[in-house]
Image: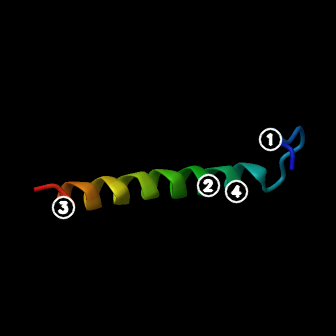
Amino acid sequence: MPVLDPNPQNGQKKLLVVLGAMLAITVIIGIIASIASP
């Protein structure tokens, strides 16, 4: 699995989705942590 595709047809969109998912997971973890903290 190449990290950087030299000729990305659909790679840019896929990368955007992956980055968006990572950001969403980070936000969700932060919200859960703020709720769980006393």
Q: In this view, does 21 lie above or below 2?
A: below
Residue closer to the observer: 30 or 7: 30
Looking at the image, residue 21 sits to the left or right of residue 37; the answer is: right
Pointer 2 and pointer 3: residues touching (CB < 8 Å)?
A: no
> Which mark lies nearer to you, 1 or 3?
3
Pointer 4 and pointer 2: residues touching (CB < 8 Å)?
A: yes
Q: Quadrant for residue 10, please give it.
A: bottom right
Q: What's the amino acid at mark 2?
A: Val
Q: Name the residue under label 1.
A: 3
Q: Where is residue 28 in the image (x, y as percent from the top left)?
A: 36, 60
Q: Mark 2 points at which residue?
A: 18
Q: What's the amino acid at mark 4?
A: Lys
Question: Marks 4/2: CA distance?
Answer: 6 Å
Q: Position of residue 24 (x, y in %)?
A: 44, 57
Question: Marks 2/3: CA distance?
Answer: 26 Å
Looking at the image, residue 3 sits to the left or right of residue 20; the answer is: right
Q: Mark 3 points at which residue?
A: 35
Question: Marks 4/3: CA distance?
Answer: 31 Å
> Which mark lies nearer to you, 4 or 2?
2
Q: Name the residue under label 4.
A: 14
